[in-house]
Amino acid sequence: MISDMTDEMTDEVSNADAGQGDTEYGVPATAPDKKVDWVAEIRGLALMLLAVLAFHSFVAKPFYIPSISMMPNLLVGDRLVVSKYPFGWNWASASFHLAPRGTWRALGKTPEYGDIVIVVPRNRKEDLIKRVVALPGDRIAVVNGQIVLNGKPVPQAVEPPVQLDADDHLMCEGVHCYASFSAYRTRLPSGRDVYELPALRETLPNGASYLVIDHLDQMLDHFAEVRVPQGHVFLMGDNRDHSADSRATFEENGLGGPVPLSDIGGRAEFITFSFDGDESWNPLSWWGALRSGRAWDSLRPRIETSAGEQAGKR
Protein backbone atom coordinates (compact mmCIF):
# COMPACT_ATOMS: atom_id res chain seq x y z
CA MET A 1 0.00 0.00 0.00
CA ILE A 2 2.88 2.31 0.84
CA SER A 3 4.37 1.43 -2.52
CA ASP A 4 1.10 2.31 -4.30
CA MET A 5 0.95 5.70 -2.55
CA THR A 6 4.56 6.39 -3.51
CA ASP A 7 3.79 5.54 -7.11
CA GLU A 8 0.76 7.89 -7.10
CA MET A 9 2.83 10.76 -5.64
CA THR A 10 5.50 10.19 -8.26
CA ASP A 11 2.87 10.33 -11.00
CA GLU A 12 1.45 13.61 -9.61
CA VAL A 13 4.88 15.23 -9.53
CA SER A 14 5.56 14.09 -13.07
CA ASN A 15 2.22 15.44 -14.25
CA ALA A 16 2.86 18.77 -12.48
CA ASP A 17 6.25 19.07 -14.15
CA ALA A 18 4.65 18.38 -17.49
CA GLY A 19 2.09 21.16 -16.89
CA GLN A 20 4.79 23.72 -16.09
CA GLY A 21 6.39 23.42 -19.51
CA ASP A 22 9.92 24.80 -19.63
CA THR A 23 10.24 25.67 -15.93
CA GLU A 24 12.76 24.96 -13.27
CA TYR A 25 11.78 24.79 -9.58
CA GLY A 26 8.42 26.41 -10.44
CA VAL A 27 10.00 29.55 -11.98
CA PRO A 28 9.22 30.17 -15.70
CA ALA A 29 12.27 29.96 -17.90
CA THR A 30 13.33 33.26 -19.53
CA ALA A 31 12.58 33.38 -23.25
CA PRO A 32 15.54 34.18 -25.47
CA ASP A 33 15.82 37.88 -26.46
CA LYS A 34 14.10 38.66 -29.77
CA LYS A 35 16.38 40.51 -32.20
CA VAL A 36 15.19 43.90 -33.49
CA ASP A 37 14.47 43.88 -37.20
CA TRP A 38 16.26 47.12 -38.03
CA VAL A 39 15.42 46.86 -41.71
CA ALA A 40 11.71 46.78 -40.92
CA GLU A 41 12.06 49.64 -38.41
CA ILE A 42 13.89 51.86 -40.91
CA ARG A 43 11.38 50.99 -43.62
CA GLY A 44 8.50 51.99 -41.33
CA LEU A 45 10.15 55.30 -40.44
CA ALA A 46 10.86 56.02 -44.13
CA LEU A 47 7.25 55.34 -45.09
CA MET A 48 6.01 57.58 -42.28
CA LEU A 49 8.36 60.37 -43.42
CA LEU A 50 7.18 60.01 -47.02
CA ALA A 51 3.56 60.19 -45.88
CA VAL A 52 4.25 63.42 -43.96
CA LEU A 53 6.11 64.95 -46.93
CA ALA A 54 3.31 63.96 -49.30
CA PHE A 55 0.69 65.52 -47.01
CA HIS A 56 2.73 68.74 -46.72
CA SER A 57 3.28 68.90 -50.48
CA PHE A 58 -0.21 67.99 -51.71
CA VAL A 59 -2.64 68.90 -48.92
CA ALA A 60 -1.42 71.39 -46.29
CA LYS A 61 1.59 72.36 -44.20
CA PRO A 62 2.40 74.66 -41.27
CA PHE A 63 4.05 78.03 -41.88
CA TYR A 64 5.83 80.47 -39.57
CA ILE A 65 5.82 84.27 -39.96
CA PRO A 66 9.39 85.60 -39.50
CA SER A 67 8.99 89.24 -40.66
CA ILE A 68 6.73 92.30 -40.40
CA SER A 69 5.88 92.51 -44.12
CA MET A 70 2.26 91.37 -43.62
CA MET A 71 1.40 93.46 -40.54
CA PRO A 72 -1.13 94.13 -39.15
CA ASN A 73 -2.88 90.99 -40.39
CA LEU A 74 0.04 88.63 -39.76
CA LEU A 75 2.48 89.17 -36.90
CA VAL A 76 5.95 87.81 -36.32
CA GLY A 77 5.47 84.62 -34.33
CA ASP A 78 2.19 83.58 -35.98
CA ARG A 79 1.90 79.92 -36.91
CA LEU A 80 -0.56 79.18 -39.66
CA VAL A 81 -1.81 76.51 -42.04
CA VAL A 82 -1.20 76.77 -45.78
CA SER A 83 -3.33 74.65 -48.12
CA LYS A 84 -1.60 73.30 -51.22
CA TYR A 85 -4.48 72.36 -53.53
CA PRO A 86 -6.50 75.61 -54.23
CA PHE A 87 -4.32 76.58 -57.22
CA GLY A 88 -3.24 73.10 -58.29
CA TRP A 89 0.28 71.77 -57.82
CA ASN A 90 3.67 72.78 -59.17
CA TRP A 91 7.34 72.88 -58.25
CA ALA A 92 6.69 75.42 -55.49
CA SER A 93 4.14 73.12 -53.82
CA ALA A 94 6.82 70.70 -52.60
CA SER A 95 7.84 70.96 -48.96
CA PHE A 96 11.52 70.79 -49.91
CA HIS A 97 12.68 72.32 -53.17
CA LEU A 98 15.37 69.79 -54.09
CA ALA A 99 14.50 69.28 -57.76
CA PRO A 100 15.37 71.93 -60.38
CA ARG A 101 12.81 74.72 -60.63
CA GLY A 102 10.13 74.07 -63.23
CA THR A 103 7.26 75.99 -64.82
CA TRP A 104 4.86 73.02 -65.01
CA ARG A 105 1.47 73.11 -63.30
CA ALA A 106 -1.05 70.35 -62.61
CA LEU A 107 -4.76 71.28 -62.34
CA GLY A 108 -3.67 74.90 -62.17
CA LYS A 109 -6.09 77.62 -61.08
CA THR A 110 -5.71 81.40 -60.70
CA PRO A 111 -5.88 83.00 -57.22
CA GLU A 112 -8.52 85.60 -56.45
CA TYR A 113 -8.00 89.23 -55.45
CA GLY A 114 -7.02 89.44 -51.79
CA ASP A 115 -5.77 85.86 -51.38
CA ILE A 116 -2.72 85.52 -49.14
CA VAL A 117 -0.35 83.17 -50.94
CA ILE A 118 2.99 81.47 -50.44
CA VAL A 119 5.53 82.29 -53.14
CA VAL A 120 9.03 80.96 -53.85
CA PRO A 121 10.82 83.78 -55.75
CA ARG A 122 12.98 82.92 -58.72
CA ASN A 123 16.11 84.18 -56.96
CA ARG A 124 15.78 81.99 -53.84
CA LYS A 125 14.30 78.80 -52.41
CA GLU A 126 12.72 80.22 -49.26
CA ASP A 127 8.95 80.58 -49.03
CA LEU A 128 7.60 84.13 -48.70
CA ILE A 129 4.05 85.22 -47.96
CA LYS A 130 2.24 88.08 -49.77
CA ARG A 131 -1.21 89.17 -50.93
CA VAL A 132 -2.59 89.01 -54.48
CA VAL A 133 -3.55 92.53 -55.62
CA ALA A 134 -3.61 92.14 -59.43
CA LEU A 135 -4.53 89.26 -61.73
CA PRO A 136 -3.43 88.23 -65.24
CA GLY A 137 -4.20 90.97 -67.77
CA ASP A 138 -4.60 93.73 -65.16
CA ARG A 139 -2.77 97.03 -65.38
CA ILE A 140 -1.38 98.10 -62.01
CA ALA A 141 0.46 101.15 -60.70
CA VAL A 142 1.08 102.60 -57.24
CA VAL A 143 0.63 106.37 -56.84
CA ASN A 144 1.45 107.95 -53.47
CA GLY A 145 1.00 104.57 -51.81
CA GLN A 146 -2.41 103.86 -53.40
CA ILE A 147 -2.92 101.04 -55.88
CA VAL A 148 -4.33 102.11 -59.24
CA LEU A 149 -5.86 99.06 -60.92
CA ASN A 150 -6.86 99.26 -64.57
CA GLY A 151 -6.87 103.05 -64.32
CA LYS A 152 -9.04 103.21 -61.18
CA PRO A 153 -7.66 103.93 -57.68
CA VAL A 154 -8.37 101.08 -55.26
CA PRO A 155 -10.43 102.50 -52.38
CA GLN A 156 -8.57 103.11 -49.12
CA ALA A 157 -10.62 104.16 -46.09
CA VAL A 158 -8.99 105.49 -42.94
CA GLU A 159 -9.50 103.13 -39.99
CA PRO A 160 -8.88 103.63 -36.25
CA PRO A 161 -5.24 102.95 -35.34
CA VAL A 162 -4.33 99.30 -34.86
CA GLN A 163 -3.05 98.55 -31.35
CA LEU A 164 -0.30 95.94 -31.20
CA ASP A 165 1.30 94.80 -27.95
CA ALA A 166 4.88 96.02 -27.62
CA ASP A 167 6.26 92.45 -27.40
CA ASP A 168 9.70 93.73 -26.39
CA HIS A 169 11.36 90.32 -26.80
CA LEU A 170 10.22 89.92 -30.41
CA MET A 171 13.38 90.05 -32.51
CA CYS A 172 13.86 90.30 -36.28
CA GLU A 173 17.44 89.85 -37.49
CA GLY A 174 18.85 90.92 -34.15
CA VAL A 175 16.72 94.04 -33.57
CA HIS A 176 13.28 94.57 -32.12
CA CYS A 177 10.74 93.79 -34.85
CA TYR A 178 8.84 97.05 -34.24
CA ALA A 179 11.90 99.32 -34.09
CA SER A 180 10.78 101.24 -37.20
CA PHE A 181 7.51 102.12 -35.42
CA SER A 182 9.09 103.67 -32.31
CA ALA A 183 7.23 106.97 -32.88
CA TYR A 184 3.92 105.15 -32.43
CA ARG A 185 4.68 103.53 -29.08
CA THR A 186 2.41 104.57 -26.24
CA ARG A 187 1.25 103.41 -22.82
CA LEU A 188 -2.46 102.92 -22.29
CA PRO A 189 -4.17 103.95 -19.01
CA SER A 190 -4.17 100.27 -18.07
CA GLY A 191 -0.36 100.31 -18.13
CA ARG A 192 -0.17 98.20 -21.29
CA ASP A 193 2.56 99.23 -23.76
CA VAL A 194 1.35 99.18 -27.36
CA TYR A 195 2.14 100.49 -30.83
CA GLU A 196 -0.77 102.46 -32.25
CA LEU A 197 -0.26 102.17 -36.00
CA PRO A 198 -2.18 104.18 -38.63
CA ALA A 199 -4.32 101.81 -40.69
CA LEU A 200 -6.22 101.92 -43.97
CA ARG A 201 -8.89 99.53 -45.20
CA GLU A 202 -8.21 98.59 -48.79
CA THR A 203 -10.95 97.03 -50.93
CA LEU A 204 -10.22 95.27 -54.23
CA PRO A 205 -12.66 94.96 -57.18
CA ASN A 206 -14.16 91.65 -55.94
CA GLY A 207 -14.92 93.18 -52.54
CA ALA A 208 -11.94 91.60 -50.79
CA SER A 209 -11.18 93.96 -47.89
CA TYR A 210 -8.27 94.03 -45.43
CA LEU A 211 -6.14 96.42 -43.39
CA VAL A 212 -2.84 97.86 -44.60
CA ILE A 213 -0.20 100.04 -42.94
CA ASP A 214 1.43 102.84 -44.92
CA HIS A 215 3.08 105.38 -42.61
CA LEU A 216 5.99 106.61 -44.73
CA ASP A 217 6.53 108.22 -48.12
CA GLN A 218 9.20 106.08 -49.73
CA MET A 219 10.24 104.71 -53.14
CA LEU A 220 7.85 101.74 -53.16
CA ASP A 221 4.91 104.15 -52.77
CA HIS A 222 5.52 105.17 -56.40
CA PHE A 223 5.47 102.41 -59.01
CA ALA A 224 4.99 102.99 -62.73
CA GLU A 225 2.14 101.11 -64.39
CA VAL A 226 2.81 97.61 -65.71
CA ARG A 227 0.54 95.02 -67.27
CA VAL A 228 0.43 91.67 -65.51
CA PRO A 229 1.23 88.96 -68.10
CA GLN A 230 -0.97 85.92 -68.53
CA GLY A 231 -0.07 83.21 -66.04
CA HIS A 232 1.21 85.80 -63.51
CA VAL A 233 -0.08 87.74 -60.49
CA PHE A 234 1.09 90.91 -58.75
CA LEU A 235 1.85 90.51 -55.03
CA MET A 236 2.24 93.08 -52.24
CA GLY A 237 2.71 92.96 -48.48
CA ASP A 238 0.12 94.56 -46.20
CA ASN A 239 2.86 96.53 -44.43
CA ARG A 240 3.51 98.65 -47.50
CA ASP A 241 6.62 100.45 -46.28
CA HIS A 242 8.38 97.29 -45.10
CA SER A 243 7.70 94.69 -47.78
CA ALA A 244 10.01 93.68 -50.62
CA ASP A 245 7.36 92.45 -53.04
CA SER A 246 6.43 92.76 -56.74
CA ARG A 247 7.26 96.47 -56.57
CA ALA A 248 10.92 95.72 -55.79
CA THR A 249 13.59 94.27 -58.07
CA PHE A 250 15.51 91.07 -57.42
CA GLU A 251 18.53 93.22 -56.55
CA GLU A 252 16.42 94.88 -53.85
CA ASN A 253 15.51 91.40 -52.58
CA GLY A 254 12.02 91.78 -54.01
CA LEU A 255 9.93 89.64 -56.35
CA GLY A 256 11.07 91.39 -59.51
CA GLY A 257 7.62 92.33 -60.80
CA PRO A 258 4.64 90.06 -61.53
CA VAL A 259 5.12 86.50 -60.25
CA PRO A 260 4.54 83.37 -62.38
CA LEU A 261 1.74 81.17 -61.06
CA SER A 262 4.22 78.28 -61.15
CA ASP A 263 6.01 80.02 -58.24
CA ILE A 264 2.85 80.12 -56.08
CA GLY A 265 2.95 77.24 -53.60
CA GLY A 266 -0.35 77.53 -51.72
CA ARG A 267 -2.88 79.72 -49.91
CA ALA A 268 -2.79 80.80 -46.25
CA GLU A 269 -5.97 79.62 -44.50
CA PHE A 270 -5.93 80.27 -40.75
CA ILE A 271 -3.69 80.93 -37.73
CA THR A 272 -3.22 78.00 -35.36
CA PHE A 273 -1.39 79.85 -32.56
CA SER A 274 1.00 82.74 -32.03
CA PHE A 275 4.03 83.44 -29.81
CA ASP A 276 4.96 86.94 -28.60
CA GLY A 277 8.73 86.41 -28.46
CA ASP A 278 8.97 85.29 -24.83
CA GLU A 279 9.18 81.60 -25.74
CA SER A 280 12.41 79.61 -25.52
CA TRP A 281 13.50 76.04 -26.19
CA ASN A 282 12.01 75.15 -22.81
CA PRO A 283 8.42 73.93 -23.44
CA LEU A 284 7.43 75.30 -20.03
CA SER A 285 7.83 78.83 -21.44
CA TRP A 286 5.45 78.29 -24.33
CA TRP A 287 2.18 78.69 -22.48
CA GLY A 288 3.11 82.10 -21.09
CA ALA A 289 4.29 83.27 -24.54
CA LEU A 290 1.02 82.51 -26.34
CA ARG A 291 -0.82 85.54 -27.71
CA SER A 292 -4.48 85.49 -26.78
CA GLY A 293 -7.22 85.86 -29.35
CA ARG A 294 -5.28 84.85 -32.46
CA ALA A 295 -5.80 81.08 -32.58
CA TRP A 296 -8.02 79.90 -35.45
CA ASP A 297 -8.33 83.37 -36.99
CA SER A 298 -9.22 83.00 -40.68
CA LEU A 299 -6.83 84.57 -43.19
CA ARG A 300 -9.36 84.84 -45.98
CA PRO A 301 -10.19 88.50 -46.72
CA ARG A 302 -13.55 89.81 -45.68
CA ILE A 303 -15.82 90.47 -48.65
CA GLU A 304 -17.55 93.84 -48.82
CA THR A 305 -20.79 94.10 -50.80
CA SER A 306 -22.03 97.30 -52.39
CA ALA A 307 -25.35 98.88 -51.41
CA GLY A 308 -26.75 97.87 -54.80
CA GLU A 309 -25.78 94.24 -54.34
CA GLN A 310 -27.24 94.21 -50.85
CA ALA A 311 -30.54 95.64 -52.15
CA GLY A 312 -30.65 93.00 -54.87
CA LYS A 313 -30.39 90.24 -52.27
CA ARG A 314 -33.42 91.43 -50.28
Image: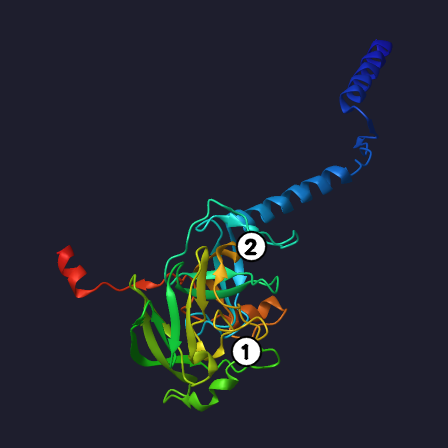
Element under disc 2: helix
Looking at the rendered image, the disc whose residue lies closer to the viewer, 2 or 1, is 2
Residue 75 in the image: state x and y as whole percent. 47, 72
The N terminus, quarter of image: top right
Residue in front for this viewpoint, 182 or 215: 215
Front-most of 88 and 42?
A: 88
- Check residue 292 in the rendering and tell me which mark sits there, or answer none: none
Q: Position of residue 238 (x, y in %)?
A: 42, 72
* Image coordinates for residue 223, horizontal then vertical, percent: 43, 76
Q: Which amino acid lies under the numbered mark 1 shown in the image of this protein?
A: Leu
How packed mark 2 is, by other alpha carbons closer than 10 Å (few <14, some 14-19, many 20 or more), is many
Label 1: element kind: loop
- The residue under the point 54% across, 52% down is 93
Q: Residue at x 46, y 84 (%)?
A: 218
Q: Is residue 127 left or right of residue 164?
A: right
The residue that appears at 48% across and 89% down in the rendered structure is 182
Dot 2 corresponds to which residue? 92
* Disc assigned to residue 170: 1
Quadrant occupied by the C terminus? bottom left
Q: Amino acid at mark 2?
A: Ala
Judged left or right of residue 263, residue 233 is left
Q: Is residue 160 above or below residue 186?
A: above
C-alpha separation, residue under disc 2 versus residue under disc 1? 29 Å
Residue at figure coordinates x 60%, y 49% from the top left:
53
Report the colour scheme: rainbow
Instruction: Pick the residue in front: 293 or 271.
Output: 271
Q: Position of residue 51 (x, y in %)?
A: 59, 44
As drawn, the residue found furthest toward the right would be 3
Q: Residues within 10 Å of mark 1 (few under 14, many from 20)?
A: some
